Image: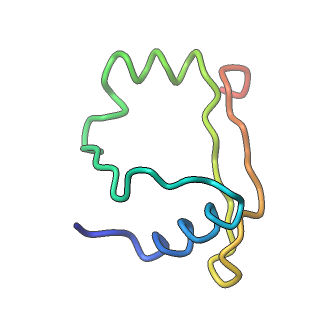
Amino acid sequence: MARDRFHNQVKAALIKDLWSITHDPFSIQISDFFQLPFIQKSLKRHTVNLVIYDPIKTEIKQWINFNNTNK
């Protein structure tokens, strides 16, 4: 399975932050995934987190929370 170039750094950063990685890889079809009605509904109802990480230090630098008030 192809992974993007930062997969291992992000995984290491999450593990440093005491996350448990349970499914690696976790496969989804991106092509129309975010257009599915239940995903659209979830995005409108729930917070979506954006992860900012340092690939050199393999550390999570910041979490940005986007919810329906940010749209």
Q: Give the colouring mode of the picture.
A: rainbow
The residue drawn where x is 24% and y is 44% is 29
Residue visible at 37% across and 58% down in the picture: 24
Q: Quadrant of the N terminus?
A: bottom left
Name the residue: 73% across, 49% down. 63
- How many badges with numbers are in the image? 0
- Image quadrant in which you'd find residue 34: top left
Query: Which residue is farthest right?
Result: 62
In-image side of 18 versus 9 (left or right): right
Q: Position of residue 59 (x, y in %)?
A: 71, 70
Asked if 61 appears above or below 26 in the picture, the reply is: below
Above or below, 29 against 6 in this view is above
Give the side of residue 63 with respect to residue 46, left or right: right
Instruction: Please identify the quadrant where the C terminus is shown.
Output: top right
Where residue 32 sits in the image (x, y, percent)?
A: 26, 35
Q: Is residue 11 left or right of residue 34?
A: right
Horizontal arrangement in the rendering, residue 27 relative to residue 17 (left or right): left
Position above or below: 42 against 26: above
Q: Measured from the top left, where is residue 54 in percent x and y?
A: 69, 74
Identified at 34% across, 50% down, the residue is 26
Residue 61 location, x and y as percent?
77, 63
